[in-house]
Image: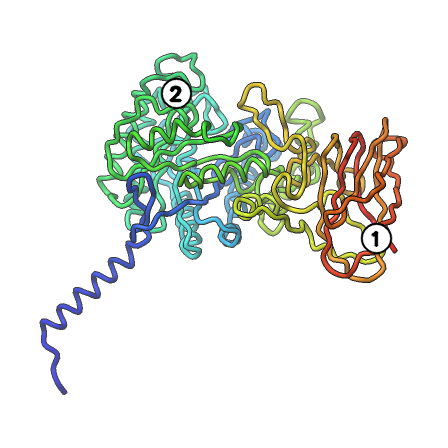
């Protein structure tokens, strides 16, 4: 047998080693000029989702806004069921809220990244509870949860961005965001809180330094603090942000001692909107993370961040946004991606309709809310336990309501101007099509409503989107009734469209279920783009939910796909359903 020369074997070993290194590093994200790139130098647009409510509960997520912070929610629960059951409930919460199935589903929908809002108390003790002052006690639970989440992300080729949402002491005057107890020194009022935070980030960076699917470190979420002027409650008027810049430099130094691979995301004051004094850059792998809520989706809304990108040659990331309507989501994402900016939405699941997954309200929850707000009697321990245990089960993906309209708005509608059916509408004689199941698509494509989004942080723009905050997250106003849902608050000119599949011959009539307490409504019915010559009058009924059927003869529909559009020439009525007949 012919021997292979040693130098050839050595060269082969070197080449193989280089290939292995390249394989291991190809997915590390880096800041390069105005862009985030991977190890191959390809631009990466992060399309992410934040896991709010898992490690850190904020009251509004569960209709507990009057209670607020997580520690207070826990106190209220403990008051009803005792400390042992409360401890069990919170352990099960962490186990059930977010699991592999949640991450798999988000990957299938199109997300390529996850932002993990961390609560420090799952990883380390509060400074006042440390057995030895100035030392750090590390807790396994948070690190184990992060390891599991990273494994799920890696299995789906998704990046995991670690976000310190609740820092020791709490980093802002908005108490809910960071689970802050105002009776204790804040993050900014206690040096030990900041030392612990820096040690925590060093610990995380040391643990994940070689993990290519860690997308980076979002080191401090939404500072909202007046350093120069304590009355600057939100930190929006701050001119220097000197303590924030010092912390960002110090934490970067600690991270770089053990990890030179990962991006560090920078959030300014004023809920990640005020970057006065933060620059110039001090590291070559930084990304500016801004947050955007409740303002118009026009270039001017992000111009100051584009200017910072140009001035300091730093990539941008919309690290948190959402809590609005589908129309707003589509427009915001379109604005970002047109400017080469990735994004992370807030949040994946809670009670309510404006996120992909809705946590159903458990039976008896109203009684808990009434008691906690001083409007009802104290529920028995047994009843409280039953409700809270059902709440735990409702956290699971398989028990969530999937809002596919939200997902469609965040992905397909960003690049498509056509509508698709909300449900598979296979129509035979006698089929009933709920009015609320109009097509999915942009405003002006699947529906038209005079009020499609909320601009609650923009003075003078007093709009709401779906006024009923029920069933769907489009601009159409929907509210529940005794047998489902219906469209209400219909104004002149508004319309909804339905794509249907006629499954049999002879369909030549529809009956519109409507109600009108006062006045006379008027409808135009469009079929396949053609309006019927005769308008349909809606007479007053005995109430706005006293449904009456209006029969309408239409041209006989062939088998196959057709579109129907119900347009309010004159509004003032409610719309329940369409029944098809011969």
| Residue lying at 70% horizontally and 33% vertically, measured from the top left | 468
Mark 1 vs mark 2: give the one in front: 1
- Which residue in the structure is indicated by mark 2? 185
Q: Can I make out residue 200 in this image?
A: no
Dot 1 falls on a residue whose secondary structure is strand
Q: Is residue 422 left or right of residue 569?
A: left
| Residue lying at 23% horizontally and 32% vertically, measured from the top left | 282
Q: Is residue 40 left or right of residue 89?
A: left
Total numbered labels: 2
Q: Which mark is residue 555?
A: 1
Q: Can I make out residue 337 in this image?
A: yes
Query: Where 226 sits versus 245, above or below?
Result: above
| Residue lying at 88% horizontally and 31% vertically, measured from the top left | 540
| Residue lying at 21% horizontally and 61% vertically, measured from the top left | 18
Instruction: Please report contact status of discs 1 and 2: CB closer than 8 Å, yes or no.
Output: no
- Residue sitting at the far bottom: 1
């Amino acid at each position: 047998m012919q021997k292979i020369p040693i130098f050839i074997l050595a060269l082969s070993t070197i080449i193989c080693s280089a290939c292995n290194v390249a394989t291991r590093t190809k997915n590390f994200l880096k800041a390069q000029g105005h862009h985030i790139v991977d190890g191959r130098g390809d631009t990466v647009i992060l399309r992410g989702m934040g896991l709010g409510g898992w490690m850190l509960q904020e009251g509004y997520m569960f209709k507990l806004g009057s209670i607020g912070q997580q520690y207070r929610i826990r106190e209220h629960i403990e008051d009803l069921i005792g400390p042992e059951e409360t401890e069990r409930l919170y352990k099960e919460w962490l186990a059930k809220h977010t699991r592999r199935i949640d991450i798999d589903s988000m990957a299938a929908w199109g997300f390529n990244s996850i932002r993990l809002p961390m609560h420090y108390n799952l990883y380390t003790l509060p400074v006042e509870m440390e057995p030895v002052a100035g030392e750090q006690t590390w807790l396994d639970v948070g690190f184990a949860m992060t390891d599991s989440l990273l494994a799920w992300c890696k299995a789906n080729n998704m990046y995991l961005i670690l976000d310190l949402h609740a820092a020791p002491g709490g980093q802002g005057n908005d108490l809910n965001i960071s689970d802050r107890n105002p009776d204790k020194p804040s993050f900014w009022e206690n040096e030990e809180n900041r030392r612990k935070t820096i040690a925590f980030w060093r610990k995380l960076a040391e643990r994940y330094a070689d993990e290519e699917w860690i997308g980076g470190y979002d080191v401090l979420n939404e500072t909202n603090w007046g350093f120069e002027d304590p009355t600057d409650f939100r930190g929006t008027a701050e001119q220097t942000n000197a303590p924030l810049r010092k912390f960002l430099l110090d934490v970067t130094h600690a991270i770089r001692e053990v990890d030179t691979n990962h991006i560090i995301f920078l959030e300014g004051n004023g809920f990640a909107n005020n970057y006065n004094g933060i620059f110039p850059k001090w590291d070559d792998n930084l990304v500016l993370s801004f947050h955007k809520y409740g303002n118009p989706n026009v270039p001017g809304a992000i111009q100051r961040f584009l200017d910072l990108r140009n001035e300091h040659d730093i990539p941008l990331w919309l690290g948190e946004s959402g809590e609005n309507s589908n129309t707003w989501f589509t427009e915001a994402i379109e604005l970002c991606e047109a400017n080469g900016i990735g994004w992370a939405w807030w949040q994946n699941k809670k009670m309510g309709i404006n996120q992909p997954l809705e946590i159903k309200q458990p039976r008896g929850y109203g009684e808990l809310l009434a008691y906690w707000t001083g409007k009802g009697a104290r529920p028995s321990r047994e009843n409280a336990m039953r409700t809270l245990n059902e709440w735990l089960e409702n956290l699971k993906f398989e028990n969530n309501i999937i809002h596919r309209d939200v997902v469609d708005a965040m992905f397909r509608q960003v690049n498509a101007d056509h509508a698709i059916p909300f449900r598979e509408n296979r129509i035979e004689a006698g089929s009933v099509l709920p009015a609320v199941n109009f097509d999915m698509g942009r405003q002006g494509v699947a529906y038209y409503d005079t009020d499609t989004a909320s601009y609650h942080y923009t003075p003078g723009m007093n709009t709401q989107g779906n006024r009923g905050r029920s069933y769907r997250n489009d601009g159409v106003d929907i509210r529940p009734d005794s047998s489902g849902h219906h469209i209400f608050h219909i104004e002149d000119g508004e319309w909804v469209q339905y794509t249907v599949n006629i499954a049999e011959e002879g369909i030549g009539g529809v009956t519109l279920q409507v109600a009108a307490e006062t006045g006379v409504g008027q409808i135009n019915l469009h079929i396949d783009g053609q309006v019927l010559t005769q308008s349909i009058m809606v007479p007053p009924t005995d109430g706005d939910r006293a449904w009456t059927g209006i029969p309408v003869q239409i041209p006989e529909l062939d088998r196959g796909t057709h579109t129907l559009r119900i347009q309010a020439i004159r509004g003032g009525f409610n719309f329940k359903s369409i029944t098809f007949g011969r």
